[in-house]
Amino acid sequence: MNQATKRFAAGICVGGGVLLLLFAGFKLLSPSPAQVEYQHGSDLMQVQMYEAAQKDFQTAIRLNPHYPPPYRALAMMAQKQGSYPLAAEWWRKYLHLSPHASHAWCRLALTELESGQEVQAYQDAHTELKLSPQCPRAALVLGEIDVHRSEAAAALLHLQTAAKAYPNQPQVQLAYARVLALTHQYDDAAQILHTLLSAYANHPDPYVWLGYVYARRSNSPQDWQKAETFLRQGLAIDPVNARALFELGRLRLMERQYAKAIPLLQQAAQYKRHFLGALYTLAQAQQGLHQTSAALQTLKEFRTESDMAQQEISLLKSCSANPKNPAVYLALGQLEIKRQEPRAALIVLQTASKLQPGQPQILLAIKKARQMLHANASALPSGMPSQP
């Protein structure tokens, strides 16, 4: 082969190599079919075509089950639509592929809390704090859980963090004001609640909690009158608001108007299950009218409910401390059945069943909870929703 031929052949090889590199680069830079479907779904979401977007995201998952973004998109879509259990499932699938994703564990925790999965929410919020120690969403979740578990100091700390991060979020500010009121910081709570009245003009909670604050801030007739005014405003928006009815009943008790207090407190206990404050105050009002038999019966119900509430808090903490122990979840599920709370029972019993599949006691408890749930749904009047 002469020199010219060699140079020509070398040129072909070099040119071919460049073309191969360019082709490989094009393949790397061009989006995959799953990416194309995901992007199209994202565009549809922007114009609120949610059903079509959902189909595109699911197609993307079928094309590439290991591609994380469509799982996140489906989780956020379900969360926005209020389908919290479904959102939690999508968040778990996303986090299985991207366990270190930024602010995803906190979103999972929030959906779990909204769907009644308190134990899982507690664990996942703490997982987020390991990745992002100042995460306000995780702090919000933990603050709400601390309130339920009667851990006021921890709740105040967490909700203070959330409130500073979300100054323009009325729901977060309301949660913070509520815990301020519960920890006797009445003036600070009142200041926040008054600013929320415009944002929550058609919602009873700011009015009701202002009633709570003024009813307890002092024994002055002026504060009690303010309390009643706000509570009446809350009841005008929501006539069956148990907290407002309880606070009004408590005011009547403080004024020794026992006959007026009793029906208010009875309604509060009727509209809100396991309302310990309403039961205890009702017994006091009944005793004030010398209705001894009725007072003793109400006190008996109060003690039973109080004991179960303490057991629930203790078992919830045990589940958080021992998340792999099915016996603790079983005990909590059985307690929720005893408290006539089959939905809450099923949540923890299903976790127990995953940890110990086929365990007879767990399966029996799940069956009983489902039967209770079905019976409760069947007992509802026609047209009434099965859950609030």
Image (spheres, rainbow, N blue to C red):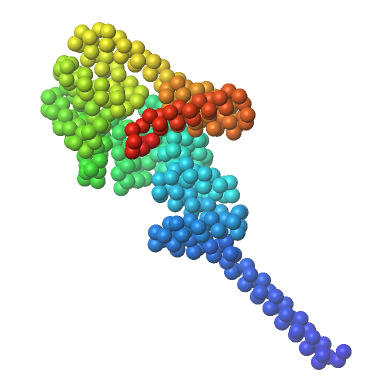
Residue visible at 33% across and 23% down in the picture: 275
Q: Position of residue 237 (x, y in %)?
A: 21, 38
Q: Is residue 318 visible?
A: no
Total residue callouts: 0
Q: Position of residue 36 (x, y in %)?
A: 54, 65
Q: Position of residue 341 (x, y in %)?
A: 43, 27
Closest to the observer, 85 or 121: 85
Looking at the rendering, in which quadrant would you find the N terminus? bottom right
Residue visible at 73% across and 80% down in the picture: 16
**Which image quarter: residue 26?**
bottom right
Looking at the rendering, in which quadrant would you find the C terminus? top left
**Which image quarter: residue 343?**
top left
Q: Position of residue 14 (x, y in %)?
A: 74, 81
Closest to the observer, 5 or 369: 369
Closest to the observer, 385 or 38: 385
Residue farthest toward the front in the current orientation of the protein: 382
Residue visible at 52% across and 44% down in the picture: 89
Q: Is residue 322 left or right of residue 203?
A: right
Q: Is residue 363 visible?
A: yes
Residue 75, compared with residue 326, is above or below; it is below
Q: Is residue 222 left or right of residue 141?
A: left
Residue visible at 53% across and 28% down in the picture: 366
